[in-house]
């Protein structure tokens, strides 16, 4: 064989890898072998210059009925119709390493989905249409090329779910700067609802209906308390690795005043849209991991933490989702 033939083979292989790994210029997808998805929507700084930047929405009625358009001449009302635009710095590095650890621990590749466009141009963790007024929402703000990428991203998640046999779980990776040095694990429980869970205020059915791990609840004897706060909770596994989690066992040691004063992200659009809580009969559970700035901005802590979160998530999957390895 000639060197030209070898070059052709190499080019062909590279081309296949590229086609395989990108749903579009802005959506990277690494296909998985198990019912586990790691998604990273806010880590990119790639900013297409021809796209308008997202901005605050406009309001028709004193702060209600917001509508978002990056190209409209309406006057933005940032107080009433705010929008998120910060990059979740270093979450791409961390998330890819988490997926690598999951692959090592479970012996199979998880699905990995990465948005490769900056949040200031597109936010896939927000709706594109407001379900109340039918107008453009925060996500793509009515800009058609951004909306097409949005559809690719969520279409891929829907396609993975549709081919799943049995239960699975999605880990949506984000970053926050709440200055609490704790990873906020979002199962769609609000902070006051976590307080109610700790205090035994609500009955089991109320707890069940609030939870982003609904398929797990419905198919096992685990309780919400077990999954969010117990010895096999994701928070417990992460704390075992030396990093604080909210909720986690350390949450139980806090005074009521301390807990109620914390900032907390309980899970966003992707967890709601693709997780089992709101999708009837679907078996994809979902949890959001909001990684604190204290870790993300530390070049020495990032690799250690990525290993820790990968190990903790693997421990959680192995305990509660043994079906995925069958
Ligand atoms: Zn985020």
Image (spheres, rainbow, N blue to C red):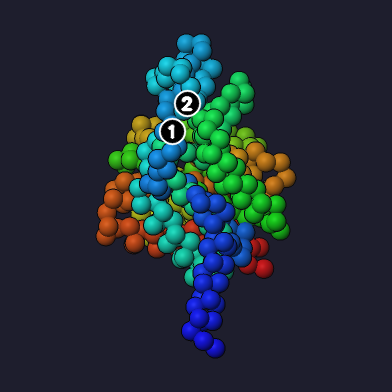
Where on the picture, by quarter, is residue 309?
bottom left
Where on the picture, by quarter, is residue 206?
top right
Q: Position of residue 267 (x, y in %)?
A: 50, 40
Q: Rounded to the nearest whole Å, what is the CA distance between mark 2 and mark 1? A: 7 Å
Element under label 2?
A: loop
Looking at the picture, tell me which residue is in the foreground, 178 or 225: 178
Q: Which residue is mark 1?
A: 52
Picture layout, residue 115 above or below residue 49? below
Q: Residue at x 65, y 38 (%)?
A: 278
Say if mark 2 contacts mark 1, CB within 8 Å.
yes
Residue 256 in sight in this render: no
| Label 2 Cα crowd, 10 Å radius (few <14 / some 14-19 / many 20+) | few
Residue 18 in sight in this render: yes
Of mark 2 and mark 1, the one earlier in the sequence is 1
Looking at the picture, tell me which residue is in the foreground, 51 or 158: 51
Q: Is mark 1 within 8 Å of ligand 1?
A: no
Q: Is residue 129 left or right of residue 102?
A: right
Q: Residue at x 52, y 22 (%)?
A: 67
- The label shown at residue 71 is 2
Quadrant of the image for the N terminus? bottom right
Looking at the picture, tell me which residue is in the foreground, 36 or 39: 39
Picture layout, residue 19 above or below residue 131? below
Residue furthest toward the bottom? 1
């Amino acid at each position: 064989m000639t060197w030209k033939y070898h070059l052709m083979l190499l080019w062909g292989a590279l081309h296949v890898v590229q086609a395989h790994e990108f749903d579009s210029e802005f959506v990277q997808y690494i296909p998985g072998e198990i019912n586990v998805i790691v998604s990273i929507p806010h880590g990119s700084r790639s900013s297409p210059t021809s796209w308008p930047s997202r901005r605050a929405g406009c309001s028709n009625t004193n702060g209600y009925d917001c509508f978002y358009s990056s190209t409209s001449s309406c006057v933005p009302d940032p107080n009433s119709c705010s929008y998120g635009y910060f990059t979740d710095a270093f979450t791409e590095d961390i998330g890819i390493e988490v997926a690598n650890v999951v692959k090592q621990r479970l012996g199979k590749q998880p699905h990995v989905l990465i948005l490769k466009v900056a949040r200031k141009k597109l936010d896939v963790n927000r709706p594109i249409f407001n379900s109340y007024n039918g107008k453009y929402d925060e996500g793509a703000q009515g800009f058609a090329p951004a909306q097409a990428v949005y559809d690719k991203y969520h279409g891929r998640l829907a396609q993975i779910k549709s081919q799943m046999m049995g239960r699975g779980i999605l880990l949506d990776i984000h970053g926050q700067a709440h200055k609490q040095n704790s990873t906020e694990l979002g199962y769609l429980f609000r902070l006051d609802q976590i307080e109610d869970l700790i205090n035994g205020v609500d009955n089991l059915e109320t707890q069940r209906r609030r939870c982003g791990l609904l398929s797990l609840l419905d198919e096992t004897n685990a309780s919400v308390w077990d999954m969010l706060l117990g010895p096999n909770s994701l928070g417990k596994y992460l704390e075992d690795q030396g990093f604080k989690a909210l909720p986690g066992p350390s949450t139980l040691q806090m005074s009521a005043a301390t807990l109620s004063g914390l900032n907390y992200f309980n899970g966003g659009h992707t967890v709601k849209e693709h997780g089992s809580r709101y999708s009837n009969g679907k078996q994809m559970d979902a949890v959001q991991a909001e990684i604190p700035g204290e870790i993300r901005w530390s070049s020495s802590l990032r690799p250690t933490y990525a290993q820790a979160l990968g190990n903790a998530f693997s421990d959680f999957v192995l305990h509660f989702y043994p079906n995925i390895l069958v």
